[in-house]
Amino acid sequence: MAAEENDEERRRRDDAEEERHYWESLEDARRDKEKQEAEQREAAIETMEKWFFEQFEDPQNETPRDSESQTYIYPWGGPFEASDVLHGQFSHDFDQALIDAAVERIERDGTTEWAPTSYGDYYEHPDPEQDAEGQDATVRQLTQQVLDRLDKLEAAVAELPGRPGTIGHNVPPEEVGLPPYEEVNPTEIKTAIVEVHDVLAQDDPDPLQLVTLSRRFDGWGTKIGHWLAKKADLAVDEAVKNGMKLAAASVLLHELGHDLITLAKHLLAQF
């Protein structure tokens, strides 16, 4: 009888031990799977991070910056966002959660806009078929385009409507308003035109000065455009005429801003 009880107790212990081993094996398998998944996740993130920093860098490393607006200029392409380029490069290899994790890792220091590295695939090299003489010709062409645009803008500014009291008896009613001269002063535009001429007259025009001036012209064009958008229902004849003059000036200001930034980028690319 005692022997039978001992055998039964032994079987219970063996069954308990076997069950313990079974659950331990499941737990070990779960941990191994989690470890493997974590290693695969980390490897994927490291792959994307390594590729990204082969292609891109913090713009403060080499990218010139406009001292007035404290914004970077990207003469060699950009700015680029990590989420965009990683998705374009790795969307067929990794799911969105992994890409998002890589973006978070890349942007951990707070930088969200990136410049291309000079040895990467996203760097906009000068046209290899265009020699130094050709590049100089492009700069001369852009410079002349800017000078022509300055002449047109100067003529347009001269025709802009004046402040209240200078338009005569055709001053538009209160609800129509007047150009935003608190923000856009024709005298300041004329001064900026002179500044552009002075920069372009130099043997080596400073591209960063051109960028600063570009921001000003573009900003004035935007402010006039916003004012006109609010006055889309102009109904007074003189106000309509003035609105057309302002619209023309706004377009010229934007075009000049674009020409200046393009010229500045070509000058920077020659360095």
Image (cartoon, rainbow, N blue to C red):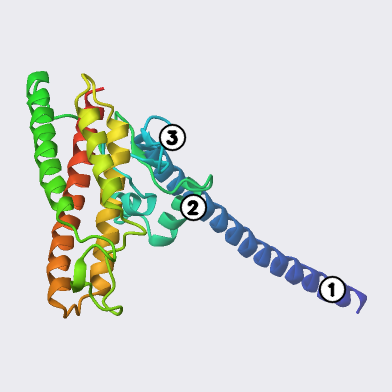
Against 106, is 24 above or below? Answer: below
**Label 1 or label 3, whichever comes before in sequence order:** 1
What residue is shown at x 82% (from left), y 76% (from top)? 8
Q: Quadrant of the C terminus?
A: top left
According to the picture, the residue beneath numbered tag 2 turns out to be 104
Earlier along the polypeptide chain: callout 2 or callout 3?
A: 3
Residue 227 visible, this angle: yes
In the picture, measured across the screen, residue 185 lies left or right of residue 148, that is right
Task: Identify the residue under disc 3.
Answer: 60
Q: Where is residue 104 in the image (x, y as percent from the top left)?
A: 49, 52
Q: Are marks 1 and 2 in contact (CB under 8 Å)?
A: no
What is the crowding at mark 3: few (fewer than 14 residues within 10 Å), some, or many (at least 20)? few
Disc 1 crowd rating (10 Å Cα; few below 14, some 14-19, many 20+) is few
Name the residue beneath numbered marker 1: 9
What amino acid type should be assigned to the residue bearing mark 3?
A: Gln
> Percent x, y for residue 32?
57, 55
Tell me if residue 25 comes above or below residue 257 in the rendering: below
Mark 3 element type:
loop
Amino acid of disc 1: Glu
